[in-house]
Image: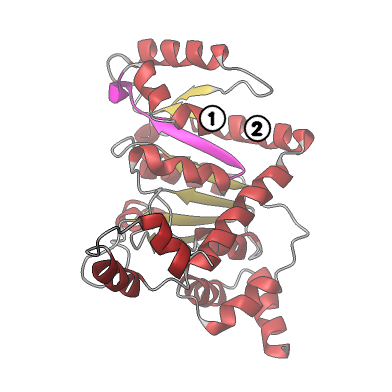
Amino acid sequence: MKSLDIHIASLASNDHRVIARALTWVENDYPESAALLASLPFDQHVPVIGFTGPPGAGKSSLVNALISHLLSEKKKIAVLAVDPTSPFNYGSLLGDRIRMSEHFNHPDVFIRSVATRGSLGGLSAKMIEMTDVMKHSGFDVVIVETVGVGQSEVEISGLADTTVVVLVPEAGDEIQTLKSGLMEIANVFVVNKADRDGADHFVKNLTAMVHQKANDWEIPVIKTVASQSIGIVDLWQAVLHHQAQQEKSGKAVQLLAEKSLQLIAQHHLKHIDKQALIQNLTQSSNKIGFNLYQFLNQYYFN
């Protein structure tokens, strides 16, 4: 237990080697991970900012520009960039780490590429635990960027304190945006590449939709050109404004509930052997009168 205490103290001191080791424990479900997670002090608030949106919207470029701004404010930043899984070694393809290469060796920036490993929703199955490790490792801000898989990305809203949905003028009409489910999870909208044709019209329509759905938080629509660092200050101010509103609204407990439900489901699912499930289904599904719910009740729901 003493060595674990030393490890946690090293996390808090922002030792990047220790942080990398802890994330490896958690991501690969090593025996040490359970004790580490159970020993984390949950008495401090570090904002988790989620960036999501369709492929090609420029999420990585936007995060890169935001990192530059936060560094100018003397912030320490952690980035979990979720990449598609390599079909060869099941690791991440490291695309986001390459796009953020200018910050990769900065002492106040820690970037970790994480493989989805088949997880739906744009996130890795271990992202909640890895984010909590980051929150207790001496960083001022934790940024999570999803792979950009479209409608399934709504699960980012169960992880991030503030969810930034990144779109481009070519994203289509506002009705399609609403159908994708992104309207339901966005705390801040960003129309990136706003120097392109049609940007002002798209922003106008999106803003009109936001006003129609306004409740306790009126979602801001920010125009950015990430490649030129235009609009980044406005984006960060919108995030800070949302953070302040969240603290007043008491929604932190709702976020904890969402995280708890995901962790509970993940805990139960890890005991399911997929190959054994397929074998059982192969044997049972060919029998006359097969019923999926009877099958699940017999083998898995007890």
Say whether residue 179 is magenta.
no
Frontmost residue, 267 versus 289: 289
Q: Amino acid at mark 2?
A: His
The residue sitting at 30% across, 39% down in the picture is 55
Q: 10 Å neighbourhood of mark 2: few (<14), some, or many (≥20)?
A: many
Q: Is residue 140 left or right of residue 94?
A: right
Toward the front, the furthest residue is: 288
In percent of width and height, residue 239 lies at 60, 35
Q: Is residue 178 left or right of residue 138?
A: left
Q: Identify the magenta region.
A: 160-172
Q: Is residue 167 magenta?
A: yes
The answer to which image quadrant residue 279 occupies is bottom left
Q: Secondary structure at mark 1?
A: strand
How far is the residue under mark 1 from the one under mark 2? 8 Å
Q: Is residue 22 visible?
A: yes
The 10 Å Cα crowd at callout 1, few under 14, some 14 to 19, many 20 or more, is many
**To which quarter of the image does residue 83 belong?**
bottom left
Residue 242: assigned label: 2
Where residue 74 sits: x, y (%)? 62, 50
Q: Which mark, by number, is residue 75?
A: none
